Every structure is written in C-alpha cells, then in structure tokens.
Image (spheres, grey):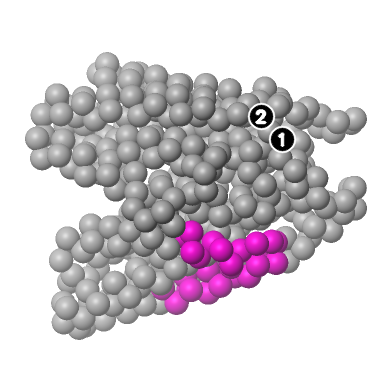
Amino acid sequence: MSLRFLPPAGAPRVLAAAQLANSIGDGAFYVCSALYFTRVVGLSATQIGLGLTLAWAVGSVAGVPLGALADRRGPRGTAVLFALATSASVASFLFIRSFVPFLVAVCLYATAQCGLAAARQALLAGLVERSARTGALAHLQSTLNAGLAVGAALGGLALHEGTRRAYLAVFALDAVAFLLCAAVLLRLPAVAPVPTRTGGEPLFAVVRDRPYATLTVLNAVLLLRMPLLSLGIPLWIVERTEAPSWLVSALFILNTLGVMLFQVRTAQAVTDLGTASRAVWRSSLIMLVSCGVFALTAAEMPVWAVAVVLVAAAVLQLVAEMLQSAGSWQISFDLAPAHQVGQYQGFFGTGVPVARTLGPLLLTTLLVAWGVAGWLLLGALFLAAGLATGPVVRWAERDHARRGGPVTAAAESPSR
C-alpha cells in the first residue's frame, strides 16, 4: 500500500492498526456466522433474525450511557474494556448450542460493539486536533474496508471447507482479533476523563439536545444505504432482474475497494459545518439518481446492459456513501460539546443499529414488493433527509450559541 493511503503517524496510525485488527476478524465473522448458527447450531433463520434485531436494539439504547462512561472514566480504558468484552462475547459463540444462550451472547456482542464505537470516537477526539478528525476518520474507514475484505476472504476459505472446525476457527480468529485490538489501543496515550455534568446539566444531556437528536434521526435515514448494499440490492438483482447472481458479490467488492481507495480523498474537501452540510446534500441528490438508475434495470434489456446499468448505479451509490460519511463525521464531532464527546458519539452512532434493524423490513417492502415505485420513494426519502440536514445544522449552531457559544470553539485543543 502506498504511503499516501496510510494515516498520519501517531494516534491516527495506532487507531488504524486497532481498526485493522478487529475488522479482519469481523470480516470473517460476518461471512460465516449465519451459516454456522443454522447449519451447525441448528437455529432457524427466524430465531437468528429475532436475536439480531433484539441485540442491536439493546446496543442502540446502551450507546448513550456507555459513551457517557467513556467521558467519565476516560476513553482509552473504556475502549479497551469494550474490546475485551467483544472478544469474550465472540468466544462464547464457540459453546452455544441453543437459542437463549445465543440471544444473551449476541446482545452482549452488540452492546460491546456500540460501546467500543463510542469510546473509540471519544478517544480520537481526545488525541486528534478538531481540524484533522474527519481526515483521520476517512483513513479509519478505508482501513475498515481493507480489513473486512481480508477477513471475508478468510471466511470464504472456512465456507469452502464447510466443517464445524472451520467455522469455530473463524470465531476464534475474531475473538483473538479483538484481544489484539485491545492491546494496540493500550499503546495510545491516556486521555483524561472529563465531568459529564456541569451545574444543573442533566446526566444524559444529548437526549435533550433537540437539534442534535434530529440530526441523528436524519443520519439514520441516510444510513439506510447500509442494508441497501447488503440486502436490498442483492434481493433486487435476484428477484427483479435477469442479471447473474454473481453480480451481487462483484458490486460488494466494488464498494469495498472504492471506499478503501477514495474515501480519504473525498473527505479532504470537508473541513467545517458548511462544507459538511453541502457534502450531505450532494450525497442525497446522488442517491436519488442512483435509485433511479437501479430502477431502470427492471426494464426489458439484454443481460449485459442490465449489468452495465447496475455497475453505474453502484458507482453513484459509492460516491454518495463517501460524501455522506465525511459530512456526517464532521457534523457529529463539531456539534458535540468537548466534555461530552463520548455520549454524543454514542447517541449519533445509534443510527447504525437503527438502520440495520428497521432497514430490512422497509427495503424489502419498497424494492421487492413495490418495484420501481419503491426505488423512487426510497430516493426521495434520501433526498428529503439530505435537504433537511443543512437547516438543522444551522438550528444546532444557533442553539449552541444561545446556550453559551459554539461548541466547536471548546473542542479546538484535545487532551493529551
């Protein structure tokens, strides 16, 4: 890999190393977990779906208090704790033989993952200057995609082997990967904990910050692109087009490689709340066009033409994803008070489990049941959320100024 793809030396590079470790394990886990629990453990698809839905619902609710814990106890130690908890939850999968233990373990896994994400964001905020955070997150996202790709390849080997021992090796790999992640995080400087309450401020102030809460909801809508890539598009290709099924894998690889190669470059143009709002708006407009192009594949045309149109739509989606990611990172950090980054990031991060929980039902209804009309409605939903982001960001700026000045000013100098 060329040096220009590496994050800057120091905290960003160490954070990227930790990200790489756990994403390799997760890539293998994601590829193999569903088949392991159905073929080896004997759970039904309904049980797995119910368990994952409940688990991510629990994780999303736990995000705010766990983020507040990172603020109060210090984000480095908290991140290490959650990395160890994630490792333990994955290791427990090795011994699960029925639904109830599976439900307990997957709830622990989702909760630990949400806590780790919030603590890691707070750790980055404490170690990286505000102006460099979006760039650092772009490097981390590229690293995440690279690790997932490597892990998915390893998981593919286990799927090819198809034995219980091969599946268990994948779970062991993921558990060890999170142990390695914890060890790497310990190489970072400690960030001093900050008080989460000042004066009469409520314990979980973020839930009363109406502009930020609104932005979190809008971001959750925009994050429907995640289940769209993993579920909506594959179902559309298989059930509504004449394209070969192997295009599902090809489009996923295209997205993974695209983010890995171009996310950092895309994020360079996002430097403040103004450029972030414009990036999100452009992202939503491109998603509208992408949805329209996907809808075209329902028309009668040669298979090769369907494939070309699908690739074109996937490229548009990739560009929109990178713009939306960069814009949302900048917004979520710049509007978080410096002494409450953990709980604010924990709250903003609930958009991911919410999109993963509600997205499958919404997307299957829109795309599989409604077809072309569903694609157009989905595109309009993306556009509406993107258009609303700018005005809500300005509302948040006014609200923070009214309450005592811009929060970004307080976040200029990170603790070291």
Magenta span: 263-290
Left or right: 270 as drawn, with respect to 361: right
Quadrant into which the C terminus falls: top right
Front-most of residues 81 and 364: 81
- What type of secondary structure mainly makes up the magenta span? helix
**Are the residues tagged 2 and 1 within 8 Å (C-beta)?**
yes
Residue 316, quarter of picture: bottom left
Q: What residue is rendered at 14% in x and 24% in y?
A: 165
Q: Residue at x 28, y 77 (%)?
A: 309
Magenta residue check for 24: no
Mark 2, Cα crowd under 10 Å, few <14 / some 14-19 / many 20+, is: many
Find disc 1 in the rendering and name its residue: 415
State the SS at label 2: loop
Instruction: Tell me if 14 is positioned left or right of 311 in this view.
Output: right
Taking 397 as reference, is 40 above or below it?
Answer: above
| Side of 362 relative to 165 (left or right) | right
x and y percentages locating residue 151 in the rendered image:
28, 41
Considering every residue shown, the one lying at the far bottom of the view is: 301
Give the residue pinned by disc 2: 191
Residue type at mark 1? Answer: Ser
Q: Residue 405 at x, y = what percent?
A: 87, 51
